[in-house]
Image (spheres, rainbow, N blue to C red):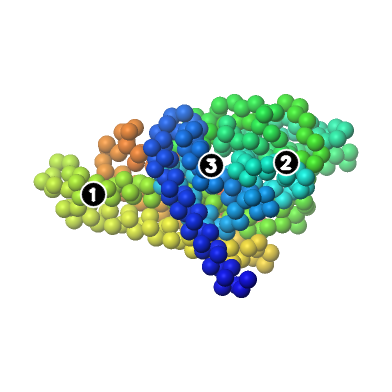
Amino acid sequence: MTMTEAAGNMRETTEALVAKARAAVPVLAAHADATDQQGRLAPESLEALREAGLFELGTPVEFGGADVDLVTLVRVLSELGRACPSSAWVVSISTGTKAHFSRGFPEKVLAEVYSHPDVRWCAGSTPGQAVTVPGGVKVTGRWAYASGAEDAHWAFMAVASVGDDGVPHVGGALVPMSELAIERTWRVAGLQGTGSHTVVADGVFVPAERFFEFPLGPDGGPDFLMGRPLEVVLQAVSVTAPLAGAALGALDVVKAVVKTRKPPMTQYNSLAESASARHVFAEAEHMVTSGYDRLISLAGRIVEQWPGDDVTAVQRSSLRMEVVSILQQFLRAVDLLLDLHGSSAFALDNPLQRFWRDLNVGARHAQLSTYLTTENYGLLVTGAGGPVQVG
């Protein structure tokens, strides 16, 4: 196969997956309120995503998964987020967790885990405790913010143990959800439907083949990026994609009423008749659409530089700065759209307020910390020191 043919096949795969995502949108939109209120994906939404094969995105190809690049993933997740950001978020987290951590386990384990390609994972990053026992480890801990926990099949959990030398070792354990408890702790203002609850283990046995220790990085600490320096940026872009969808969804809501909605206490018959309203809408529309284009472009640059072995720390930090810059653009745009729509946008039956809540909560995810990303970049470009955060 020539490079041209391979590129053509990739484009066909991308367009097919985007079309599947678009076909699932009406179902996700129709059940977005139920997803929000129930604190987990509505059964109808879950089934629509499964039927579309969108939980297969992070599954290894040899086990029936789809080998997609970051540009394709961003397009698919943004499309889903345009209807229901919570649904898109759960797909994003499961996809990223599987794609990154599957390679830490032997083929025998993966064959068991991926008995069906649409298997779903959740994850907890704050390390629990692992105690070595014959044949494996026993794991104890609490892992908060495990998005999609109630609908996941497996949980990947970071754990720490102390060896005979007194040195702490950090690894990852893969555990069936049937062996874990879930505490419904996710009560937040936005992304309510992600069900990012707390996963609990109390002395759960994990066989040795389902546990691995993270390799050591150049600084002597655990390398959570597992030898892929751009992984931290890739994951940041992946979780931004559903939020891009939220901004696009908010734009859709206001665009649908701009010619019919009357500005309050004026003689205008519609927002479109008001010069100032047109100006605000044009500004917001451009922020959203250009922000989306920037995100696609950034994803393409990451694909070209992957896995980033020759990317400097400054370059990597600069890419993260671009992610948070795009997010700030989305946040500002949706605020403008709310100004245009007025107070009725905050009625609970108006999807605009849900897009606004989901965007604002998601933008504060640890991967997207604006102030720490800026601090890292400032330290690096001034030569004042190394980053205070991974990446």
- For the point 36% across and 51% down, the residue is 333
Query: Callout 3, which amino acid?
Result: Arg
- Whether residue 273 is visible: yes
**Residue denoted by label 2:** 112
Q: Amino acid at mark 2?
A: Glu
Distance from label 3 to label 1 (Cα)?
35 Å
x, y percent for residue 299:
53, 60
Q: Is residue 176 above or below residue 66?
A: above
Residue that carries the numbered disc 1 in the rendered image? 258
Q: Nearer the viewer, mark 2 or mark 1?
A: 2
**Label 1 sits on what residue type?**
Val
Residue at which label 3 appears: 50
Q: Which comes before the other along the chain, label 2 or label 3?
A: 3
Q: Secondary structure at mark 1?
A: loop
Look at the numbered disc 2 and give the secondary structure of its residue: helix
Q: Nearer the viewer, residue 389 or 112?
A: 112
Residue density around tag 2, few if under 14, some if 14–19, many if 20 or more, within 10 Å: few
